[in-house]
Each structure stands twice: as C-alpha cells, then as structure tokens.
Image (tube, rainbow, N blue to C red):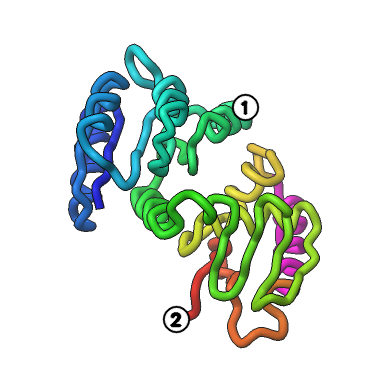
Amino acid sequence: MRILIVEDEEKLALALKESLEFERYAVEIAHTGEEAFFLVNERQFDLIVLDLMLPGRDGIYVLSTLRRLKLQTPVIILTAKDTVEDRVLGLDSGGDDYLVKPFAVPELLARIRALLRRGRGENATTLRLAGLEVDLLTRSVARDDRPIELTTKEFEIIEYLLRREGTIVTREMLARDIWKVSARAVPLDNVIDVHMARLRKKIDQGFAFPIVQTIRGVGFIAREPD
C-alpha cells in the first residue's frame, strides 16, 4: 500500500513516514500543495494524509482540486483547526476523515486501516461491521438483516464508532464531536452513558457477541469479536 503524506512540518512528516514504514506501508512526502499535485500526477497512491495549513496553496484548495479532477483516493485531513466549521469544510471539500493535532499515531494508523478496508464507492455511504450495516444515505440500521430503530443521537454515535472501528472512543471525543461541547462537565458523562447503554441494548441484545464494548475507565470501542 502506498501512502502520500502532505505536511509542511518536516519533523512531523518524517516521524509519520517512519511510523507508517514500520507498518510496511510505502510512503512519500510532499511539503507543499504543488509537490502533492506533482506526485499524484506521477504516481498512484492508496491513501493521502493531508495537512490543511500548507504554504502557498492550502490543503482545502489541494483537496477540492483533486476531487474536481475525479481522484477517488481516500484522504485523511490533519490539522490544528478544531472548530465545527473547519471540520465541516474539510469533509465537504472531499475529505474522508478528520484528525486534529496533536494526535496519537496509533489512532492515525487505525483510521488509515479502516479507510483502506472500506475504500470509496459503495462503502463510502454504507458502514459495515460483523453483520451490522449502517446506511448513511437512508439513515437506516440493521444487524443480520434485522432492522434496528435508532434515535438521531444514537445514529450519530454508531456512525462515529464505526468510522473509528478498532479505536477507543473516549467520552471527551463524544462530548466534543457529537454533543459539540468542548469543556466536558460531569453531568454530560451521565448523559453519554445513558445514550451508550440504550445504543448497546439495541445493537447487541440478542446476538452472540457485542459489537459496541465499554473499555472501563477509558471509553468505548466498536470491533469484531476476538
């Protein structure tokens, strides 16, 4: 698998390259948007890790241009920008995932694996895991062909978990990205736990193994059975 890192911070780019090569990916680096365009035209990549704050042509320009040119390569956005508006802009411009700096490399690796498994096309609108199917267009959910009725918030949570398959999702992440609350308060923990309990009951009750699991003292995770 070949990955392009578009990042102007040389130390970070080299650190990411080293981590990805350790996982046996072939990695190339572009430090500017112009370099990224050149490499994409010269070579085929399976995934692009794209910083938004680039000198000259910024990441949004690069991403929008690549999508206008019908490039379907999955793109993970890396940025220090953490507002809802920034995330929406990045995803609406064609990004497949969004990771805010500073971030943990294991989380980036997990998101890369998830995107490479899913690819684009049909799976971009349908998330699947161990018999669970979440249709992002019709907002319908089923497990082993059994329809599951979810509230709007429950749907947002399961989508969030499946997009981070195999990665622990903390209460802080849910508070920030689902409830849009940056300063987490104790009462919100209770709200999150109530929603998670209801979601797990709907998703997992009556099946042989749980897809949504609680990692005590840490958060939640969606994953295949061992």
In this view, the residue in front, 45 or 54, is 45
Whether residue 52 is visible, yes or no, is no
Region in magenta: 185-201
Residue 119 lies, with reference to residue 81, above or below; the image says below
Farthest top residue in view? 56
Q: Which mark is residue 180?
A: none
Residue 122 lies, with reference to residue 180, above or below; the image says below
For the point 56% across and 65% down, which residue is it?
Answer: 128
In this view, the residue in front, 84 or 176, is 84
Disc 2, disc 1: CB below 8 Å? no
In this view, the residue in front, 169 or 148, is 148
- Residue type for callout 2: Asp
Q: Position of residue 167 (x, y in %)?
A: 47, 60
Element under disc 2: loop
Residue 62 placement, left or right of 196? left
Q: Which mark is residue 226?
A: 2
- Residue type for callout 1: Glu
Farthest front residue in view? 70
For the point 66% across and 57% down, which residue is it?
Answer: 135
Q: Position of residue 124 (x, y in %)?
A: 53, 50
> Residue tagged by mark 1?
85
Asked if the magenta segment contains residue 196, the reply would be yes
